[in-house]
Each structure stands twice: as C-alpha cells, then as structure tokens.
C-alpha cells in the first residue's frame, strides 16, 4: 500500500526526523494560510499522487510568491496528473503539499528495502540524488552504494558511517547522517514497510540533512496490525477495479490487454500471463482469487474482470490443491450464470478431482470452453479474443 508524500513525512516526523516546513491544501482558498505557514516568499507546490516522475510531468513547481502558488494550485487541483509511471490515464490530484523552498547544496539518494536474495534488509545510497535509481544503476552502477542489515543484529553505526564517507559528507554531516539512517531504519522495521525511499535527501546550505521527498510502501500482509497506516489508504489513487477487488479481498492489478485472467495463486497467475503473451495475446489483468476460492469469490472476480470494457475473453486457470476442482467447477458454473458473462470463458482445471470438474463444465450447457492443459487454455483464450 502506497502513502502520499505528506503522509510519509508525517510518519517520519513522528519518529523525530526533521522535515521541511509544509502544509497540505485541498482548496485554492487555503493557499494564503499555507503560504504564510511555510514562511512566505518562495515555496514549492507538489501534486500528491501515487506515482514518481511528478516533476517531469509538471506536478512539482517552484513558486516565487502567493500569486504563483494560487495559479499553480488552480491548474493542478482537480486534474489528472499523467507521469511516466501512471500513464495513460494518470491519477487525480486532490491535495497539494506546499513546502518551504530550501537552499540546496547537494542532493543524495537513500532508500531501505528488503533484499530477498540476501534475506536481509537492504540500504541503497548514491551521491546522484534526484535521479531514478533504476536509471542510475544501469548507466553508472559504480555510483550506487549498498549495505545489508541482518535482522538479528539490526543496523550498526559503522554501516551508516561507511555510507556517509562514501557519499563525501563532511565530518560535521556524518553524525547527522548516521542518526537519520538509524531513525529511518526504525521506521522501516516498526511500520512493516516494503520500501522507504528518500529521493532526494538534501544537504542544505547550512549543512542540514532533510528529506525533500519521501516514498513509503507498506507491506499489504502487515496492514492487519498497521491499522493507523491502513486508514490512510487513498482509494482514489487506485484503478476503480483494484479498489473494488481490495474490498473483497481479491488481489487484482489492471493491465492494458484484452484477455481477463482469474487464477488461484500468484506464481500460477504470472505463468498464465506469460503463456498468454507467448500465444500472441495480452493479459487484461493480474487476478489471484487465493487458494480457497469459492463460488462467491469467483463471482466477484468475474464482475471485477468484466468491469474492464477491453476484455474480449476470460481465462480461468485453477489448480486444485487446497480445494477440489469439482467444487471450483460448480462455483464457476454458478458465477457465470449469476454474473451473466457475455464473452467467451476458457477454463483449465488441474489437480484434485480435475476430471470430475471438467465433466461438470461440459455438462453445464453454458458457453464455457474446457481446456486440456495450460498451453491449450492460453491458445484458445487468444483465439477467442481475436474473433
């Protein structure tokens, strides 16, 4: 789950991290008070959307005074901001973050994530702040610094000093960097984050270290115990189908193809999408109904898939491990009849009582195409979508 920049910075402030002075506004009439609160004069206004690349898309603007701030707010509020990361439709701008304009001497990059290969927490830093780290890693990998943190020992101060020296910080800034990194690590662990990215982390002219931007991604699996953060979810930033899926406990991500996918298991879903692509088609979504799929969950999943007008065929791929395929087949039959599906539905069942499940589908009298295997299912789905 993503947080807005202003929400992420509020979390940092709760942990004692110094942040730039800022005010959130949702209406042009709030500009004057926000401008005064950040000191008047020059300020920066930032569109609050769950996407990077805001600056390139015109969503981050330096304003010389209140008049320019009001003009920027009038142009940004209520529009959809399209960036390289959320094209083609963009996301709605409902709030702006107004911050003081800082005297910046240097821009650095700093992030914490989970290094699954090393089975440890990972810290990434670079002296080339402001750049996208993926681009930097590809073009100048020697400028990307890394440290891994064992979850038992936790972050050690020498690791912070190693990074600070490698970043070229002065002796007076090293201690501040080590303290900041310690605070960020505590936020990362205690808030169950999947990513905490500060880009850029700026060194000001008076040698303060401040997060000019902050991105936080909370691990969805931990939202049950991070109720305060879960309450900050902004459903307006999600595809409407994704928001509906979240309400029903279904994992759904909208894509730009025309073959709807319903699968039980994330790995199987990825393989299904790969085979659709290999067969010459394009998946319209990633959808994982989970191992305990029922008639109700299948029906909700079908409704969500069919909410996408681009869908021309649906591929249901179920492996009966935890649940029996004949029970899943009954659920699919009920769901197809209940939802009133008007596009071809290709079903591949494998696992426990798969033969019985396929027999039920064949005898249903509905326009359900039972496939022999996954390759066959992908091929048939692509053929049906092209009719």
Image (cartoon, grey):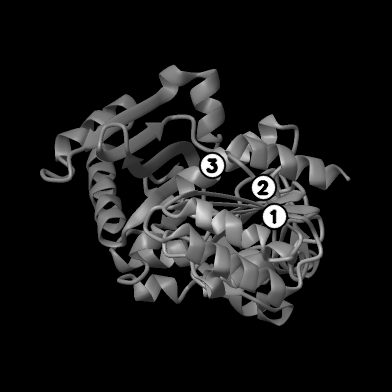
Percent across and percent down for residue 51 are 61, 52
Residue 59 appears at what percent x and percent y? 69, 55
Other residues around mark 2 within 10 Å, as few (<14) / some (14–19) / many (≥20):
few
Q: Earlier in the sequence, mark 2 or mark 3?
A: 2
| Residue on which the image places disc 1 | 59
Earlier sequence position, callout 3 versus callout 1: 1
Mark 1–mark 2 CB contact (< 8 Å): yes
Above or below residue 32? Residue 174 is above
Q: Closer to the observer: label 2 or label 3?
A: 3
Q: Position of residue 135 (x, y in %)?
A: 56, 28
Left or right: 256 with respect to 212?
right
Q: Does 272 sit above or below residue 334?
A: above
Image x and y of residue 106, in percent: 47, 36
Residue depicted at x 79% and y 70%:
74
Name the image quarter holding the C terminus.
top right
Res. 40 in view:
no
Front residue (pair 211, 227): 227
Residue 380, image quadrant: top right
Marks 3 & 1, CB-CB < 8 Å contact:
no
Residue lying furthest right in this view? 387
Q: Is residue 114 left or right of residue 288?
A: left
Q: Which residue corresponds to mark 2?
A: 55
Q: How many angstroms separate mark 1 from mark 2 (CA)?
A: 5 Å
Q: Residue at x 67, y 30 (%)?
A: 278
Mark 3, residues whose alpha carbon is within 10 Å: few (<14), some, or many (≥20)? some
* Disc 2 to disc 3, C-alpha distance: 32 Å
Q: CA distance from mark 3 to mark 1?
A: 33 Å
Q: Residues within 10 Å of mark 1 (few under 14, many from 20)?
A: many
Q: Which residue is mark 3?
A: 270
Q: Residue at x 42, y 59 (%)?
A: 291
How many labels, in total? 3
């Amino acid at each position: 789950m993503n947080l807005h920049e202003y929400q992420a910075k509020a979390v940092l402030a709760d942990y004692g991290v110094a942040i730039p002075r800022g005010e959130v506004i949702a209406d042009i009439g709030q500009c004057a008070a926000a401008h005064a609160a950040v000191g008047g004069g020059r300020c920066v206004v930032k569109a609050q959307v769950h996407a990077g690349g805001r600056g390139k898309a015109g969503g981050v603007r330096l304003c010389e005074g209140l008049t320019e701030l009001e003009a920027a707010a009038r142009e940004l509020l209520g529009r959809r901001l399209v960036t390289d990361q959320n094209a083609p439709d963009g996301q709605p701008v409902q709030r702006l973050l107004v911050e003081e304009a800082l005297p910046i001497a240097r821009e650095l990059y700093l992030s914490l994530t989970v290094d699954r290969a090393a089975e440890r927490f990972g810290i990434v830093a670079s002296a080339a702040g402001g750049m996208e780290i993926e681009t930097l890693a590809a073009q100048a990998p020697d400028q990307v610094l890394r440290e891994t943190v064992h979850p038992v020992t936790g972050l050690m101060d020498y690791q912070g000093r190693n990074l600070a020296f490698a970043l070229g910080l002065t002796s007076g800034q090293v201690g501040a960097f080590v303290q900041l990194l310690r605070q960020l690590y505590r936020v990362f662990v205690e808030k169950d984050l999947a990513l905490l990215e500060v880009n850029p982390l700026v060194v000001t002219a008076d040698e303060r270290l401040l997060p000019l931007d902050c991105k936080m991604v909370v691990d969805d699996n931990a939202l049950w115990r991070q109720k305060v953060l879960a309450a900050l979810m902004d459903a307006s930033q999600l595809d409407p189908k994704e928001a509906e899926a979240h309400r029903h406990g279904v994992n759904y991500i909208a894509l730009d193809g025309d073959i709807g996918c319903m699968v039980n298991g994330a790995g199987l879903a990825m393989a299904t999408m790969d085979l659709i692509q290999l067969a010459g088609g394009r998946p319209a979504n990633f959808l994982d109904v989970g191992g305990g799929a029922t008639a109700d969950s299948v029906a909700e999943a079908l409704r969500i898939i069919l909410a996408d007008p681009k869908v021309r065929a649906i591929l249901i791929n179920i492996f009966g491990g935890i649940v029996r395929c004949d029970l899943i087949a009954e659920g699919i039959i009920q769901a197809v009849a209940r939802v009133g599906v008007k596009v071809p539905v290709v079903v591949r069942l494998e696992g426990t009582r798969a033969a019985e499940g396929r027999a039920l589908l064949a005898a249903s009298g509905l326009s359900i195409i039972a496939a022999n295997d996954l390759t066959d299912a992908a091929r048939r789905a692509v053929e049906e979508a092209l009719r």
